[in-house]
Image (tube, rainbow, N blue to C red):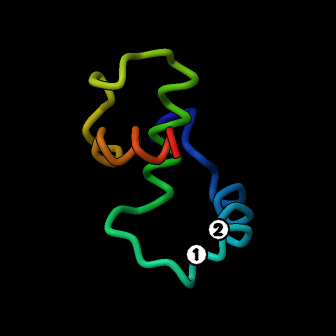
Amino acid sequence: MYSTDLKETQWQVIKKILKMEARKLKYDLRDIWNAIFYIVKTGCQWRMLPSNFAPLTVALYRYHS
């Protein structure tokens, strides 16, 4: 867990807003959000994203959409 990761209470609010029950995704959206927050906060290169996050291509796609 990184300091940039969403706390459970934060994730519950986002999950409720996004109506996650209706969505079927291959990758966990929370992992994608955590990856994006990590990149934004640390300023690291996308290719240096730690492997315990969602795959780079998935996180990058969601960041740009």
Q: Residues within 10 Å of mark 2 (few under 14, many from 20)?
A: some
Res. 52 mark: none
Q: Secondary structure at mark 2?
A: helix
| Identity of the residue furthest to the bottom in this view | 22
Vertical placement of residue 52 versus 30, above or below: above
Vertical placement of residue 62 versus 20, above or below: above
Identified by mark 1, the residue type is Met
Residue 13: where, in percent of width, then height? Answer: 74, 64
Q: Secondary structure at mark 1?
A: helix
Residue at image position (35%, 62%) is 27
Report the number of discs: 2
Identified by mark 2, the residue type is Lys
Q: Which residue is mark 1?
A: 20
Q: Which residue is mark 2?
A: 15
- Which sits earlier in the primary sequence, circle 1 or circle 2? 2
Residue at image position (55%, 35%) is 37
Residue 48: where, in percent of width, then height? Answer: 29, 22
Q: Are marks 1 and 2 in contact (CB under 8 Å)?
A: yes
Image quadrant of residue 24?
A: bottom left
Residue 55: where, in percent of width, then height? Answer: 28, 45
Image quadrant of residue 41?
A: top right
Depth check, front residue: 17 or 41: 17
Depth check, front residue: 18 or 42: 18
Q: Quadrant of the N terminus?
A: top left
Residue at image position (69%, 61%) is 14
Q: CA distance from mark 1 to mark 2?
A: 5 Å
